[in-house]
């Protein structure tokens, strides 16, 4: 599912809302999650999962094409951990 499909589904299920308002709501939610993670905060959506940021230390990597060693700088990467309810639903334990 892509963002526009999510917006369309929410708009269809809530006919009292304009699609542009639904789009603004969805974009605001994603922006707030992104901003919180950029600050290093953890975002938890109960039953769904938690978004956090993990630090990857600098290391010496390898160029797979040439085999040459390359320096990879430290970086921060997004991390998602599923919630129990989502995990149970995916495994057919509704």
Image: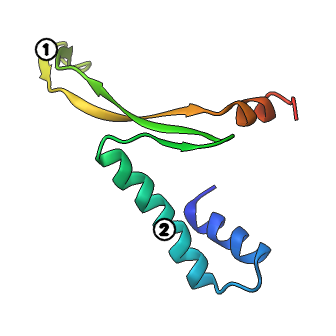
Judge from the rendering whether residue 52 lies leftward or rightward of residue 56; answer left or right: right
| Residue drawn 79% across the image and 73% down it | 13
Q: What kind of colouring is applied to the model shown?
A: rainbow
| Residue drawn 56% across the image and 84% down it | 20
Check residue 33 in the rendering and tell me which mark sits there, or answer none: none
Comparing 15 with 69, the one in front is 15
Comparing labels 2 and 1, the label whose residue is closer to the camera? 2
Is residue 50 positioned above or below 57 on the image?
Answer: below
Residue 46 at x, y = what percent?
Answer: 64, 42
Is residue 30 positioned above or below 80 on the image?
Answer: below
Is residue 26 positioned above or below 41 on the image?
Answer: below
Q: Residues within 10 Å of mark 2 (few under 14, many from 20)?
A: some
Judge from the rendering whether residue 80 lies leftward or rightward of residue 17; answer left or right: left
Residue at mark 2 to residue at mark 1: CA–CA distance: 42 Å
* Quarter occupied by the C terminus: top right
The quarter holding residue 21 reads: bottom right
* Quarter occupied by the N terminus: bottom right
Residue 4 at x, y = what percent?
Answer: 58, 68
| Residue drawn 78% across the image and 30% down it | 88
Q: Circle 2 is placed at which residue position? A: 27
Residue 31 at x, y = what percent?
Answer: 41, 61
The numbered mark, 2 or 1, whose residue comes first in the sequence reads 2
Check residue 68 in the rendering and tell me which mark sits there, or answer none: 1
Judge from the rendering whether residue 41 lies leftward or rightward of residue 87; answer left or right: left
Q: Residues within 10 Å of mark 1 (few under 14, many from 20)?
A: few
| Residue drawn 47% across the image and 59% down it | 30
- Secondary structure under tag 1 reads loop
Is residue 23 positioned above or below 89 on the image?
Answer: below
Judge from the rendering whether residue 74 lies leftward or rightward of residue 25; answer left or right: left
- Secondary structure under tag 2 reads helix
**In the rendered structure, are the residues bearing label 2 and label 1 in contact, judged by CB atoms less than 8 Å apart?**
no
**Count of number-bearing discs:** 2
């Amino acid at each position: 599912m892509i963002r526009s499909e999510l917006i369309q589904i929410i708009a269809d299920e809530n006919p009292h809302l304009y699609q542009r308002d639904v789009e603004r709501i969805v974009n605001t939610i994603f922006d707030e999650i992104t901003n919180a993670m950029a600050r290093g905060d953890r975002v938890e959506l109960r039953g769904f999962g938690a978004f956090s940021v993990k630090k990857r230390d600098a290391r010496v990597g390898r160029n797979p094409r040439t085999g040459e060693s390359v320096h990879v700088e430290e970086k921060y990467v997004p991390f998602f951990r599923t919630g129990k309810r989502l995990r149970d639903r995916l495994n057919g334990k509704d």
